[in-house]
Image: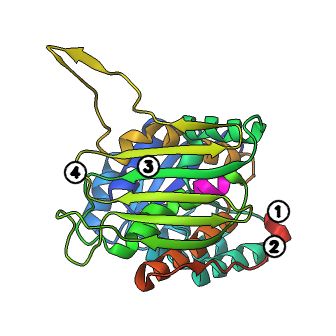
Amino acid sequence: MTSQQALGVAVVGTGKMGADHVRRIHQVVSGARVTAVVDIEAERARTLADGIEGCTAYTETAAAMAAQDVDAVLLASPGPAHEAALLEALGHDLPVLCEKPLTPDAASALRVLEAEQRLGHRRVQVGFMRRYDAEYMKLRRLLARGDLGRTLMLHHRHRNPAMPPGFTEEMLINDSVVHETDVTRWLLDQEITAVTVHKPAATSYAPAGMNDPQLVLFETESGALVDVEIFGHCGYGYQVQAEAVCERGAVRIDPEQGPRLTTAGRWGGSVTPDYLERFADAYDREVQAWVDATRRGEATGPSAWDGYAAAAVCEAGVLSQREGRRVEVELIERPAFYQ
């Protein structure tokens, strides 16, 4: 690929997230084109590929990565399939934007870290899109400026109207709270050291075997406390909010401040229906930044280390969820490679 050529991207996984990324690269992002789509459901992959000139459908990830017109990979398959796909991509020395989680557990994430270090340069960016959201970027800048003093507490809310079939209680941590895990580390620029999960009374709308909602408490290196309300079946929409409580003030991000309608003796507003709408701009910025960096021969954004650290925190969270106790997070010493 020359600097003038569009980056040929293989999108692996064509479910809701993968299909949206195919649309994004094809219609929104500049400097890239979708040259391959991969899914074990051949018809779904073919349907997407047929709508894009020069795009080939595959049912095997390895075959797509070996194709001459594939310069980079966007991984949007389920988390348990990520390790094998990441190792395959690293074997081809291909840049990868991997949707969260990097892998479902710390041990497999560590294997990815080791493979990337053997390669000798960064190739993996993890899809923690909140780092590219305008509201979260403003919050980080405010905290980093220092005017408010140290951050003492963070309050997070993460509510979904409902979870898809097959969504388990563990996935509340691994697939949802993983976002608060990363954004907490990023906002405070420190690691999470312990996790405690509390389970209040469950909503009657939760499926059998799932205690929903839950309250997750993080402890950090500096002694800050961070609470996460994760509610998988709130029923009314998708709602993500955060508030930092600092020594000399507090700052809250809430994209639903407006517009508010007042008419006929009533007032109200709307709540975004799902994450694709709420974070549409963030996804666009994230993928564009990845494409731009890749075309420059660089890797930026959340690293494989960030993915590993998040996996370790979530692993501790799942153990706390099961056993009802505080669990310390076990992390290896951060390699100089990721400093």
Q: Residue furthest left?
A: 264
> Can you say which quadrant of the picture contains the C terminus?
bottom right
Earlier sequence position, callout 2 versus callout 4: 4
Q: What element carries label 4?
A: loop
Q: What residue type is labelled 4?
A: Gly
Q: Which percent across, then down, holds residue 136?
A: 58, 41
Q: Which residue is denoted by mark 3 in the rendering? A: 21
Q: Which residue is denoted by mark 4 in the rendering? A: 235
Question: Could you tell me how far apart the alpha carbons at marks 4 and 3 are, in whole angstroms?
Answer: 26 Å
Q: What residue type is labelled 1?
A: Gln
What secondary structure is the stretch in magenta mostly built from? helix
Earlier sequence position, callout 4 versus callout 1: 4
Q: What mark, if any, has residue 335 been given in the picture?
A: 2
Q: What residue type is labelled 3?
A: His
Image quadrant in which you'd find residue 60: bottom left
Q: What mark, if any, has residue 339 been given in the picture?
A: 1
Q: Which of marks 2 and 4 is in front?
A: 4
* Closer to the camera in the image, 190 or 128: 190
Looking at the rendering, the stretch of residues picked out in magenta corresponds to: 182-186
Q: Which percent across, then down, holds residue 66?
A: 56, 69
Q: What mark, if any, has residue 22 been given in the picture?
A: none
Instruction: Please check the rendered image and state whether residue 185 is part of the magenta-colored stretch, yes or no.
Output: yes
Question: Could you tell me how far apart the alpha carbons at marks 3 and 2 are, in whole angstroms?
Answer: 31 Å
Q: Residue at x 46, y 72 (%)?
A: 197
Q: Is mark 2 on a helix, strand or loop?
A: loop
Q: Is mark 1 on a helix, strand or loop?
A: loop
* Closer to the camera in the image, 270 or 149: 149
Question: Could you tell me how far apart the alpha carbons at marks 4 and 1 are, in whole angstroms?
Answer: 42 Å
Instruction: Please check the rendered image and state whether residue 175 is part of the magenta-colored stretch, yes or no.
Output: no
Task: Decide: is 238 above or below 221.
Answer: above
Question: Could you tell me how far apart the alpha carbons at marks 1 and 2 are, in whole angstroms?
Answer: 7 Å
> In this view of the protein, can residue 271 be seen by the observer?
yes
